[in-house]
C-alpha cells in the first residue's frame, strides 16, 4: 500500500510508478478513506515532496492521525515501512523528521530514499523553477532511480539513501520551523485580471481550499499547505502569490500537463 501526497505531480508520478512495479495500491493521503486497512504480508510506503528540508505538515498530521486499528495492524503484523521523498535538490534532515514522526506511534522505518525531480518552489525571492534543460535531465534520470528504489524496497533494505545537501541541520531545525509558522499566508494568493474563471486552480487543490465565487474568480481559504498546485496549473499564469510569482516560471509533471487544457468549470 502506498500513501502519497503531491502538489505538482512529481510525487504522484513516483508513487504510481512504484505502485506499478511493486503491484501496490496507491492512495492520495488527503482523500484516503479513514477506514482503509492494512493486513499481514502487505508493505507500507509513504511518498511525498520535501518542504523546506522537512516533511510536509500535512503528511505528519496524516501519520499521527492514523486510526488505532491501522497502527495496531502495522505494529502487530510487522509491516515493513519505506519512505520515498521527492525533492528539487536536497532533503536536509527530513529522514530524521519522518523517523521521529513514525517513532511517536511506535513504528520503525526500514528504507528511506530521495528522488531528485524538477523544482516547483517559487514563493520566496531567489527561488524559481528549473531551466528546461535541468528539468529534462531530472525527468530523464527519475525512472532508473525509481527502479533502484523499488529493488531496495523488495529486498527490505535498511538504508537512508538521500541527498542531504549542505548545512542540513540548520536548514531542517532552524529554517523548517520558520516555514511551518510563516511558510504561506493564504490571503496572499490572488488571481490577476487575465483570469478567465476556468476553475482549474480550484479543481487541482488537493485540500479543496480554492473555491470559485459567483463572479467566477478563485477564492483561497485558510487551509493552504503551500503545495503550489494552483499556481503551476493555471493555463494563463493568472494565479499569483503576493507580487512574488508574476515573473516566475511554471512547472507541472508531464503526466499532469493535460490539466492545463481541462477547462470544464467546477
Ligand atoms: C513549499 C515547498 C518547499 C520546498 N522545499 C524544498 C526543499 O527543502 N528542498 C528541495 O530540494 N526541494 C524543495 N521543494 C521542491 C519540491 O520538493 C519538489 O519539486 C517536489 O518534487 C514536488 O513534488 P510534487 O510535484 O509531488 O508536489 C519545495 C517545494 C515546495 C512547494
Image (cartoon, rainbow, N blue to C red):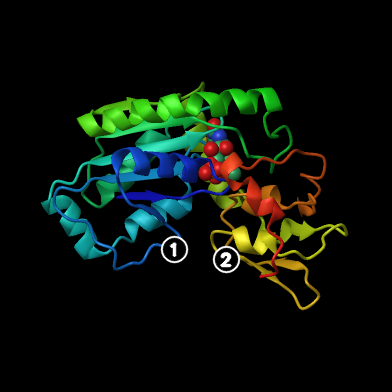
Tell me whether the residue at label 1 lies in contact with that at label 2, contact meaning CB atoms closer than 8 angstroms: no
x%, y% of residue 206?
54, 59
Which residue of the protein is positioned furthest toward the bottom in this rendering?
Answer: 214
Which residue of the protein is positioned furthest toward the right in this rendering?
Answer: 193
User: Judging from the image, what secondary structure is the residue with disc 2 in?
Assistant: loop
Q: CA distance from mark 1 to mark 2?
A: 10 Å
User: Judging from the image, what secondary structure is the residue with disc 1 in?
Assistant: loop
Q: In the image, what residue occupies the spot 60% across and 40% down? A: 254
Q: Which residue is mark 2?
A: 208
Q: Which residue is mark 1?
A: 31
Q: In the image, what residue occupies the spot 68% across and 58% down? A: 262
Picture quarter with ligand 1: top right
Indicate whether 91 appears above or below 6: above
- Badge 1 residue CB within 8 Å of ligand 1: no
**Residue 138 as seen in the image, left or right of residue 210:** left
x%, y% of residue 60?
40, 51
Q: Looking at the rendering, which quadrant does residue 89 occupy?
A: top right
- Can residue 10 be seen here? yes
Amino acid at each position: 500500500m502506498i500513501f502519497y501526497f503531491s502538489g505538482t505531480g512529481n510525487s504522484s508520478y513516483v508513487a504510481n510508478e512504484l505502485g506499478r512495479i511493486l503491484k501496490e495500491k496507491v492512495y492520495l493521503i488527503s482523500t484516503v478513506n479513514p477506514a482503509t486497512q492494512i493486513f499481514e504480508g502487505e508493505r507500507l510506503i509513504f511518498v511525498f515532496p520535501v518542504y523546506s528540508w522537512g516533511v510536509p505538515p500535512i503528511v505528519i498530521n496524516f501519520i499521527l492521525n492514523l486510526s488505532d486499528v491501522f497502527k495496531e495492524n502495522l505494529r502487530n503484523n510487522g509491516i515493513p515501512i519505506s519512505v520515498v521523498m521527492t525533492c528539487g535538490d536536497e532533503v536536509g534532515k527530513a529522514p530524521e523528521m519522518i523517523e521521529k514522526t513514525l517513532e511517536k506511534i511506535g513504528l520503525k522505518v526500514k528504507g528511506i530514499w530521495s528522488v531528485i525531480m524538477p523544482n516547483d518552489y517559487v514563493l520566496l525571492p531567489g527561488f524559481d523553477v528549473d531551466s528546461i534543460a535541468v528539468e529534462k535531465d531530472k525527468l530523464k534520470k527519475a525512472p532508473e532511480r525509481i527502479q533502484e528504489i523499488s529493488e531496495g524496497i523488495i529486498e527490505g533494505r535498511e538504508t537512508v539513501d538521500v541527498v542531504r545537501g549542505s548545512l542540513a541541520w540548520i536548514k531542517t531545525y532552524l529554517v523548517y520551523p520558520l516555514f511551518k509558522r510563516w511558510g504561506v499566508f493564504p490571503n496572499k494568493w490572488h488571481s490577476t485580471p487575465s483570469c478567465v474563471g476556468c476553475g482549474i486552480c480550484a479543481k487541482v487543490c488537493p485540500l479543496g481550499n480554492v473555491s470559485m465565487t459567483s463572479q467566477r474568480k478563485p477564492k483561497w481559504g485558510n487551509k493552504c499547505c503551500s503545495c503550489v498546485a494552483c499556481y503551476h496549473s493555471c493555463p494563463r499564469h493568472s494565479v499569483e502569490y503576493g507580487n512574488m510569482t508574476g515573473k516566475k516560471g511554471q512547472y507541472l509533471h508531464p503526466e499532469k500537463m493535460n490539466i492545463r487544457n481541462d477547462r470544464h468549470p467546477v
